[in-house]
Amino acid sequence: MLKTIKSNLSKALDENGLSKFLSEIRKFPILSSDEEMSLANKWVKSRDTNAAHRLVNSHLRLVVKIAMGFRGYGIPLNELISEGNVGMIQSLERYDPTKGFRLSTYAMWWIRASIQEYILHSWSLVKIGTTAAQKKLFFNLRSLKGKLKAVEDGDLQPELVTEIADRLDVSELDVIDMNRRMSGHDHSLNSPLSEESGGEWINWLVDESGSHENDIINKDELLKRKKMLSKGLNDLNERERQILMKRRLTDDPLTLEELSKSYGISRERVRQVEVRAFEKLRKVVKNIDYKSRNFNQ
């Protein structure tokens, strides 16, 4: 059923164009908490397609808002929105209204993750690393350079490299390397190597594309990790979940001081809640992974 919703959204975006799509989604009303709970229960308990449609449609503006934040990576906005819609639908498949939090709170992480993965696989300038630190650096470097007013082309000043590395908890070499990659420019593959050679760049490229089997394995692994994260977050109470997400599962984490003021507790108490929540999450993920490995043996 959700596949049909995803197909309809993609069709609407392709056939109507971006501007009309944005105009159309403004017509969908934002649901109240009670309306959302009622529709979510209908979907979870009886797989009511109409309820699913209303839940997804009411959150399309959230998808667009998140997608707009990723416009600086050279990917067309309609593609980012389309991928965000996929994340929105994936969140609905796993949403549990009995946990007591709004769908938007849960969905935003799936939407963001889906868009980020699409960017990492689609970005044309360079093959970006896949470690958590490299992804964090990739998605934060441009905005952090803007905050530090480091907008010039070319290598960063040494003091800026040090500050960025400290803020993002990566090595200075990683910062320099990523900045050079992201500051590059695309060139035509049919451009000549030189006037004398007569050859083209495309003739010297090595085919590094993975096999179809590897692509499937990677997608399955990504989906598996998303499921484990979802299960782990659902096992936390509301405060643990919120503090963990705001501290470790966002591109712009809040400080202990900011969270202590928000929750009216001490910085040390926030830190304790964060550590406890992370340990709970790690234990759940480790347990799921252990069961999965034993099942596959």
Image (cartoon, helix red, strand yellow):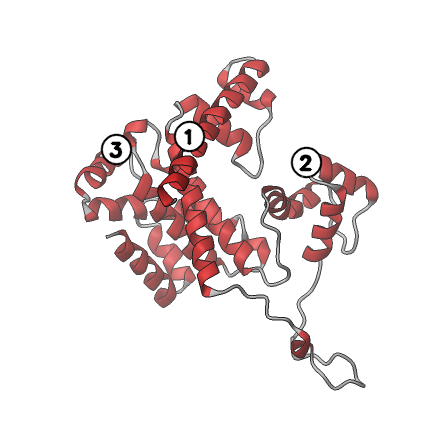
Taking depth in this image into account, of 5 and 244 the one nearest to the observer is 244
Question: Crowding at label 3, few (<14), some or many (≥20) Cα neighbours within 10 Å?
Answer: many
Mark 2 residue type: Asp
In the shown orientation, is residue 23 left or right of residue 131?
left
Q: Which numbered disc, 2 or 1, marks the residue closer to the eye?
A: 1
Residue at 42%, 30% in the rendered image: 284
Mark 1 residue type: Val
Mark 3 residue type: Met
In the shown orientation, is residue 238 left or right of residue 243?
left
In the shown orientation, is residue 278 left or right of residue 133?
left
Question: Crowding at label 2, few (<14), some or many (≥20) Cα neighbours within 10 Å?
Answer: few
Q: Is residue 52 visible?
A: yes
| Residue annotated with mark 2 | 169
Residue at 50%, 28% in the rendered image: 244
Mark 3 and mark 2 lie on one chain; the one further toward the N terminus is: 3
| Label 2 secondary element | loop
| Residue annotated with mark 3 | 37
